[in-house]
Image (cartoon, coloured by chain):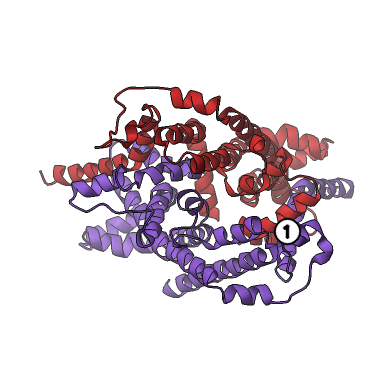
């Protein structure tokens, strides 16, 4: 290529990237850095009107968060959602992918579409729907349990059951996504491995354990990390269904951050909570990547 | 017999799964058509005994959900259009246009994939407040315009284009913008449709950002308006179900129309991710 054309190409490259990189720099990177700075200040409702009132307070917000009962409660609720809800949803995804992948299945694409449908519904709308499904008297969840001889549960009014209720909704809403990814992962396992296992006399369980499971290892890592990052962001379900209640039993870290920032206008505190969540999320992702490296 | 029984069991499980998956959505539609109060009778009916559209009429006129529907459509379409333009240019440049600093920039960008959007939301709100963009449509679409995930997806697709095609056009004297418009865009159209479907659904369904940035009822999108209504009308089961149908049905229809294209995007993201 003549240098003139190469220079032209390089210039075009920078121009083509300018809108995207500019937007990301101004509306993503800048707020991220701004948020870090904000978390070291006492930015509150008075500072909204008069920025001169902002003071540097060092690590005070972080210390205050880590000493606050509300924060630990929110962290515990969020961990519950990640540690119970995450694996549960991955298991449901895996089982439905294995069922759908069985060679004998008829109407495979119809079942796949049905299982995937909740993923594309609007979270706020289905959270409203499930709020009524969880109604202690008229809700169908209790009707179904009643048919099995189980006494009615006050799902959203009882602190013991409100978090499991949100987990159940979220599994229903999201399992179809990871199911598709598992289905794609299953396609990448060569048929020869199954044939070789069959020749060695392997049964269905042994084939699953020695061929399917290791074959899905990269898929498990992807699904595990992305699901965890998304689960840590729990917000709309408690906002719509319980407003964080009863007694703070469903207040998540992001909901706490939202309340600190936009209900009480304690932006400094809200920003500190956001960064604690970021550090926990990144640490969780690293742990999963390490664990996976060790086992494979 | 030994082959039929497992197959029967397998299909029974699949059907039970499908019924459990669809039941909440079917009930939502059924309850939205019941006269007020019917859903809260004992034993609760699954199907309406009598069909009425009064809740839809009520929501769209008296409760102003038509306005929110318009806001949702406008914000979603602007976000989709903007994102297709911005992301396709960036994805192409990262894949094919050679210049110094491109690859370090791309690696830096990939870090953004693991940072949840919520982390920067409070300062982003303060920034938009300084810029006068709070409670505007422009403020509402900003986070969707330059999706890093979208840039990855388009770049991956463009990488498979042969360099010779572009270089031949350059030797013939075509400018870079013309090459993009007349050669690249037609070839990568499939991935742009995928990107559009993705952006449409995520903008339509999004809740937290519009909740924060749209402060006035006349600007609310459907999810924000619905969350707001559900606080005031807790007892009106049938009304709230009609509101849920209005909010989520467009997303479901868009998905059904673009199903294969949408699924391809998910798989592209996971296999290369």
Q: Residues within 10 Å of mark 1 (few under 14, many from 20)?
A: many
Q: Residue at x 39, y 63 (%)?
A: A84
Residue A161: x, y in percent? 35, 59
The colour with which the image depicts chain A is purple
Q: Is residue A258 visible?
A: yes
Residue B253: x, y in percent? 48, 31
Q: Which chain is red?
A: B
Say which quarter of the image contains residue A57. bottom right
Q: Please, is residue B135 above or below residue B59 in the view?
A: below
Q: Residue at x 57, y 42 (%)?
A: B224
Count of all numbered marks drawn on residues in the image: 1
Residue B53: x, y in percent? 43, 22
Q: Nearer the viewer, residue B138 or A12?
A: B138
Say which quarter of the image contains residue A26. bottom right
Chain under disc 1: A
Would residue A26 appear left or right of B191 to someone viewing this image? right
Would residue A172 appear left or right of B85 to someone viewing this image? left
Would residue A98 appear left or right of A201 to someone viewing this image? right
Q: Residue at x 18, y 42 (%)?
A: B8
* Residue at the extreme right of the image, as rendered: A4
Residue corresponding to mark 1: A31
Would residue A96 appear left or right of B196 to someone viewing this image? left
């Amino acid at each position: 290529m003549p240098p003139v054309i190469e220079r032209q190409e390089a210039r075009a490259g920078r121009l083509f990237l300018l809108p995207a990189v500019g937007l990301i720099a101004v509306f993503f990177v800048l707020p991220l850095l701004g948020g870090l700075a904000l978390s070291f200040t006492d930015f509150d409702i008075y500072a909204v009107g008069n920025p001169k009132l902002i003071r540097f307070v060092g690590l005070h917000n972080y210390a205050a968060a880590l000493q606050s009962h509300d924060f630990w409660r929110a962290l515990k609720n969020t961990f519950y959602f990640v540690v119970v809800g995450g694996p549960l949803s991955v298991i449901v995804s895996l089982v439905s992918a294995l069922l759908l992948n069985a060679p004998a299945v008829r109407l495979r694409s119809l079942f796949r579409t049905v299982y995937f449908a909740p993923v594309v519904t609007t979270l706020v709308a289905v959270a409203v729907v499930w709020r009524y499904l969880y109604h202690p008297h008229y809700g169908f969840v209790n009707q179904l349990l009643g048919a099995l001889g189980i006494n009615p549960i006050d799902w959203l009014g009882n602190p013991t059951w409100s978090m499991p209720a949100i987990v159940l909704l979220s599994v229903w809403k999201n399992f179809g996504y990871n199911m598709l990814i598992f289905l794609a992962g299953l396609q990448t396992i060569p048929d020869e491995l199954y044939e070789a296992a069959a020749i060695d006399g392997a049964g269905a369980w042994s084939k699953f354990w020695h061929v399917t499971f290791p074959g899905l290892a990269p898929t498990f890592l992807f699904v595990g990390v992305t699901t965890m990052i998304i689960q840590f962001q729990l917000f709309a379900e408690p906002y719509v269904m319980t407003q964080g209640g009863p007694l703070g039993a469903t207040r998540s870290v992001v909901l706490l951050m939202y309340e600190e920032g936009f209900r009480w206008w304690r932006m400094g505190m809200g920003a500190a909570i956001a960064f604690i969540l970021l550090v926990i999320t990144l640490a969780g992702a690293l742990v999963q990547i390490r664990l996976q490296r060790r086992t494979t | 017999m030994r082959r039929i029984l497992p197959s029967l069991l397998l299909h029974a499980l699949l059907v039970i799964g499908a019924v459990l998956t669809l039941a909440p959505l079917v009930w939502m539609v059924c309850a939205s058509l019941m006269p007020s109060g019917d859903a809260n009778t004992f034993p609760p009916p699954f199907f309406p005994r009598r069909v009425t559209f009064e809740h839809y009429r009520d929501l769209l006129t008296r409760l102003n959900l038509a306005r929110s529907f318009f806001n949702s459509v406008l914000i979603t379409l602007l976000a989709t259009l903007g994102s297709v333009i911005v992301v396709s240019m960036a994805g192409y440049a990262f894949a094919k246009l050679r210049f110094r600093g491109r690859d370090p920039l791309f690696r830096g960008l990939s870090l953004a994939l693991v940072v949840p959007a919520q982390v920067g939301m409070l300062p982003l709100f303060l920034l938009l407040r300084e810029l006068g963009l709070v409670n505007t449509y422009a403020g509402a679409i900003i986070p969707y315009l330059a999706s890093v995930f979208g840039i990855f997806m388009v770049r991956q697709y463009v990488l498979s284009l042969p360099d010779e095609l572009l270089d031949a056009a350059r030797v013939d004297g075509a400018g870079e913008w013309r090459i993009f418009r007349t050669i690249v865009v037609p070839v990568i159209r499939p991935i742009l449709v995928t990107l559009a479907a993705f952006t449409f659904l995520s903008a339509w369904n999004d809740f937290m950002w519009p909740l924060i940035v749209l402060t006035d009822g006349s600007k609310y999108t459907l999810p924000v308006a619905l969350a707001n209504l559900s606080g005031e009308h807790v007892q009106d089961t049938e009304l709230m179900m009609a509101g849920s149908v209005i909010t989520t049905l467009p997303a479901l229809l868009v998905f059904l129309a673009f199903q294969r294209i949408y699924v391809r995007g998910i798989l592209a993201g996971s296999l290369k991710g």
